[in-house]
Image: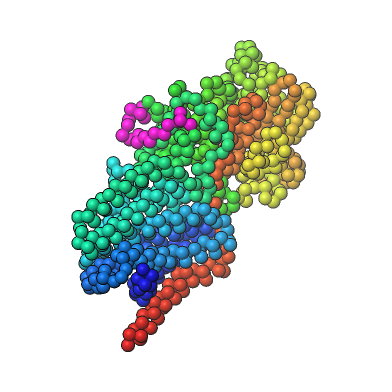
Amino acid sequence: MIAVLKKELKIYMTSLSTYVYYVFFFLMTGIFFVNSCLKTGNTTFGYYVLRRSFLAAIIFIPIFTVHIYSKEKKAHTDQLLLTAPVLSWKIIIAKYVATMLVTELPLFLSMVYPFSISAYGILNIRFTAASYIACILIAMLLISLATFFSSIISHPVLAIIVTYSGITVFWRVGLMHNIPESISVYGIYNDMISGIIRSGDVLYLLLLSVVLLLSSCILTEGRQTRRFLMSGIKVCILLVVVSGIIVIGMYYTKVYDFTAEELLTLSDETKQVLEQVKKPTSLYYIGTKSRVNATYQELLAVYSDLNENIEIIYKDVEEDPDFCDEYLGDIDNINETSILVVSEDRQIYLDAADYISSTYVSSYSVKSYLEIENQLTKAIYYVNSDQSEKIMFVEGNGEEILADRFTKLLKMDNYDIDTCNIEEAANLTQESFADKSKIAVINAPKIDYSESAIHVLEDYLEKGGNLVITLDPLNEELSNLYEFLENYGLSVQPGVVIEQEQGRYVNDTSYYLAPDIKDSVYTTEIKKQKAGLLTMTSKGIKTVEPQNGYQVTEVLKTSTQAFSKVGDFDKITSKGEEDIQGPFAIAAVAEKEGEGSLFLVSSNLFLHSDVDIESNSGNRKFFFQVVNILTKHQDGIMIEGKEVDNQKAFYPTQSRTLVACLVIVVIPVVIIGIGILVLFIRYRVKI
């Protein structure tokens, strides 16, 4: 057996086709590495580079495996092996191992790439390892398939054609309709490359490889002993036994999370929420199961496994208009991969467009976060809740409507949203406003409130109600409201805040102002998650002595170099004589024991969707924490998003050209040079 293995390796390593394969593999690897890693600063070598260059191996596998048997059968040299004092199955296995070693040698050598680039940035070993596991297992299967066809077909060219056809069937079968995707080699390969390793998939690939290899041995033995019928029976029995093992293995499969961001690992808060689910809850994934993202599919499976009341249903809405009419009639744009969460009496739609939040950390760098766990857990909690906290939005004086991004997530935090016209309430009884909810939001009024409306607000606070107020920084016509705020120790300064301290503006623009986050109960979670807050254009707040016993706490603050621009806006970055020197509070709260609290944010832009996205949803998380604390609402869920596409590297500029030249030119030239030298030496030896 060892002698046959050495013989096969010698044949491979003295064949020009082997070196052509190596050149092609490393040339493809070099090109993809330069374009996907060097130029972009990415270090996800397995997903962006190895996934593509491995296709080179698939192209060359049938050519290599022709050497296993069909060439020898055509030249009748197989009779020498069959009459040798070596069992036929040992010959087949020796040839198989030789082909495996030759085919996967460049795969192992390519490990130099990820380990070398890890010196310049973040490289997730588990995620990279998943790619190599996928390539090794697929190579084993395809070589077994090629060995099988090569052992039963005498003509080399026909053996190659049939092998390519067999590979195509195995590769694409799961993409056909009405055929389980789990048997598609292509689907399994893609899932593994994405970091989803299932024990059932590994078992499937390994046993399928073993079946094909053993079938080759059995058929070769039957041909040698001329017991063709017995060989066929043995192959059939083998197929039945192994198929049963595969089915059982897939039924009891276990999923291993090799994703770079551990996307399938749920937080303790999610697990606590799922433990309390008592109602039958359906998670409708919008889209066909054959096209579902592997990560989302396994994530939903984790939710379902943690509670038997949660059911996962894949719904193709184009083929079920009645479903759309019943559940999605009020949704204008239904996006694939979105999720509808439904219980007995509640439902909520999670738009796929909201799963990812991104923020620019510099003019050339973006951070992206996947927030599907946060939203899905909130939605499940919401549809299983029987009672909700009420939050009231004041209207009637040109107040802005809160962005859908905020209102939907408030709803998922188990808040019922109501509205109230404060001017109309002022003409009735003050109790009609005070009894509506524990918290009221006034979002950037355009028109000043009447004195009677201000009295309603004062009475509301006195009776324990809580106010959250945001201001339009360009509106100076709110004298009654500003006087009301000053009575509580919050003096709103004219003009808009201009920061002079370096680094206070994100992306070097004066629009995205990043204030100091002071230590307080309202910022604990934000500081814990290291989230940033952005207020954009803001008014300045000076704290003064309250006239009613309230205590003021500054929550967000500018630097001491900030000033409020009051006049001469042609020179906006220069402080003029009329301008007011800082520092200022951007957000502050006035509190008094036994009464309600007044939380003031000096910019309504703080609650705009675009600004929230730029802050990596930090603004939204901060707003929810403020609301939850003011209402003593303990059910608010805040799960940190998981950063995706974060494997970045900073390659030295001078070395990029040298590395590109090395991997695209030097390495392929050296390999083909070695091949030519080997062939030349072999030719000289023969002479």
In the shown orientation, is residue 669 left or right of residue 468?
Answer: left
Is 313 within the magenta? yes
Task: Look at the picture and state if 7 lies above or below 453.
Answer: below
Residue 605 is one of the magenta-drawn residues: no
> How is the structure coloured here?
rainbow
Residue drawn at point x = 44 percent, y = 76 percent:
670
Q: Image check: 687 left or right of 423? A: left
Q: Is residue 267 visible?
A: yes
Q: Quadrant of residue 460?
A: top right
Quadrant housing residue 300: top left
Q: Quadrant of the C terminus?
A: bottom left
Query: What are the residue bounds of the magenta stretch?
Result: 307-325
Spot occupied by residue 209 in the image (x, y as percentages of width and height): 35, 55
Where residue 632 sits, quadrant-wise, is top right
Image coordinates for residue 211, horizontal then vertical, percent? 32, 54
Depth check: give the residue in front, 120 or 267.
Answer: 267
Q: Position of residue 69 (x, y in %)?
A: 27, 67
Residue 659 placement (x, y as % from top left): 51, 69
Where 326 sits versus 605, above or below? above
